[in-house]
């Protein structure tokens, strides 16, 4: 199977585990990955001081979460030692599965253009293997690339960078690949379309050649292109959008279409829906089979923050209901979410947020250990009722001194006694004295 997989984000997150497993299984015909055949390029984040940590997290993710060993193919700079570059290119030439993910699109392009890397990526697919690109790397494989850091972070003038056009080389589809298509991190500020926003994307679309459009991939979503079959299938949590100026076609998760129809849509050849191949059975927005399991049918949450916020709501509800078992389970599940997302190389404040939530849960549980979760009325009721019965007998015998002693003694213990026409009533204070 010759395949190009384009992920909008989440390529090292729990959301894409099922897709990675399915793709690896089909690439290696269900057999274990052999040494030297599954490689992860480290270029996209090679400029970062923590590049070694990101490599370690990537390898950890594929081993622990996906269940397949992956090796690093090092290409951090194009001007590195020539012998090292040739060794990496030779390794790429033997790979059956090649991965590149988050970082800076334009940095990666500077290191790959004019070298043999783009040809090696294309060759992986043409040899019957699989090329998986996500986030920054996904930007590079189109004919044009979004200079996201320069525009969004540094305020550069609008414009496209030249892409590697690997997509065009292996499919004939000429498009600018735009990941993070449905990004909503900006809240009231429009960060859709890889942080461009609607106005900037529209302006940049006018700068593209007439026969080139936009292939947008939502976050935690993948477009699985089978070049041998001539089809493209959408998997994951979102949709894939084919745009040519004002013409927009949306492909839902589970949808399979012919590559010719995709090429027509992004080139502006007609406004009709792309012709669909036979429907693909889906489970939770993921093509069935290829490693998918019934246990995965509900699909994972889209981010660590969403997972943790859901657990926080569950925890608060449990505390309100005095459901200690569920509260403890929620705290444990929050810690598990931190572990599940530990391999994610996308840099954000989600982990700090999760730690704050977990620490707050632990503090609340500690307070609960002091005050107790059970209704203290239930624990003391039979003793208070016994004393009130004795007090009633003393009052009936006109032994008001004993009656007052019982009332005052209970008050010192935090129990207020109120005499009413129907008999004595009692109210327990918030906390009994030690």
Image (tube, helix red, strand yellow):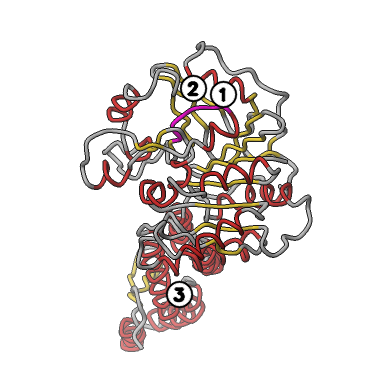
Q: Is residue 176 magenta?
A: yes
* Residue 393, image quadrant: bottom left
Indicate which disc, 3 or 2, sits on the residue closer to the N terminus. 2
Percent x, y of residue 182: 42, 37
Percent x, y of residue 45: 41, 58
Q: CA distance from mark 2 to mark 1?
A: 6 Å
Compared to residue 65, the image places residue 178 above or below, namely: above
Quadrant location of the C terminus in the rendered image: bottom left
Q: In terms of depth relative to the viewer, which is nearer, 350 or 431? A: 350
Q: CA distance from mark 3 to mark 2?
A: 68 Å
Mark 2 Cα shell of 10 Å, populated few (<14), some (14-19), many (≥20) = many
Mark 3 Cα shell of 10 Å, populated few (<14), some (14-19), many (≥20) = some
Percent x, y of residue 297: 67, 45
Q: In terms of depth relative to the viewer, which is nearer, 119 or 264? A: 119
Q: In terms of depth relative to the viewer, which is nearer, 381 or 18? A: 18
Left/right placement of residue 132 relative to residue 307 reads right
Indicate which disc residue 262 carries.
Answer: 1
Left/right placement of residue 359 relative to residue 323 reads left
> Tag 2, which secondary structure?
helix
Percent x, y of residue 125: 64, 42
Q: Residue at x 73, y 41 (%)?
A: 1
First to last magenta residue range? 172-177
Dots 2 and 1: beta carbons under 8 Å?
A: yes
Q: Residue at x 57, y 37 (%)?
A: 223
Q: Can the viewer see residue 399?
A: no
* Residue, disc 3: 376
Q: In terms of depth relative to the viewer, which is nearer, 96 or 342? A: 96
* Residue, disc 2: 266
Q: Nearer the viewer, mark 3 or mark 2?
A: 2
Q: Nearer the viewer, mark 3 or mark 1?
A: 1
């Amino acid at each position: 199977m010759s395949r190009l997989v384009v992920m909008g984000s989440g390529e090292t997150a729990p959301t894409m585990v099922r897709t990675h497993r399915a793709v690896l299984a089909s690439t290696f015909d269900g057999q274990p990955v052999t040494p030297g055949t599954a490689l992860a390029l480290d270029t996209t984040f090679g400029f970062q001081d923590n590049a070694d940590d990101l490599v370690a997290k990537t390898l950890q993710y594929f081993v622990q979460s996906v269940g397949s060993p992956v090796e690093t193919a090092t290409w951090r700079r194009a001007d590195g030692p020539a012998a090292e570059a040739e060794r990496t290119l030779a390794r790429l030439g033997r790979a059956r599965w090649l991965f590149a993910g988050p970082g800076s699109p334009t940095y990666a392009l500077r290191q790959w253009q004019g070298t043999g890397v783009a040809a090696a990526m294309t060759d992986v697919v043409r040899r019957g293997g699989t090329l998986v690109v996500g986030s920054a790397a996904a930007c590079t494989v189109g004919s044009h690339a979004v200079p996201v850091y320069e525009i969004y972070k540094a305020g550069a003038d609008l414009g496209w960078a030249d892409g590697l056009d690997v997509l065009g080389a292996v499919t004939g589809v000429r498009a600018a690949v735009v990941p993070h298509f449905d990004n909503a991190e900006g809240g009231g500020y429009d960060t859709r379309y890889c942080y461009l926003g609607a106005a900037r994307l529209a302006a940049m679309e006018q700068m593209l050649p007439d026969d080139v459009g936009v292939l947008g991939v939502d976050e935690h979503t993948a477009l699985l292109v089978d070049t041998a079959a001539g089809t493209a299938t959408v998997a994951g949590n979102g949709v894939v959008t084919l745009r040519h100026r004002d013409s927009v076609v949306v492909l839902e998760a589970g949808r399979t279409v012919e590559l010719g129809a995709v090429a027509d849509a992004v080139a502006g050849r007609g406004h009709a829906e792309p012709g669909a191949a036979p429907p693909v059975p889906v489970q939770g927005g993921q093509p069935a089979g290829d490693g998918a399991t019934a246990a995965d049918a509900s699909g994972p949450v889209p981010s660590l923050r969403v997972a943790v916020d859901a657990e926080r709501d569950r925890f608060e509800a449990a505390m309100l209901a005095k459901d200690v078992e569920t509260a403890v389970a929620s705290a444990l599940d929050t810690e598990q979410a931190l572990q599940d997302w530990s391999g994610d190389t996308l840099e954000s404040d989600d982990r700090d947020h999760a730690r704050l939530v977990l620490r707050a849960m632990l503090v609340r549980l500690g307070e609960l250990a002091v005050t107790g979760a059970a209704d203290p009325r239930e624990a003391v009721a039979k003793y208070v009722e016994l004393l009130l019965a004795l007090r009633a007998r003393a009052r009936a015998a006109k032994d008001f001194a004993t009656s007052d002693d019982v009332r005052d003694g209970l008050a010192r213990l935090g129990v207020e006694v109120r005499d009413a026409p129907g008999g004595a009533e009692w109210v327990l204070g918030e906390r009994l004295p030690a």
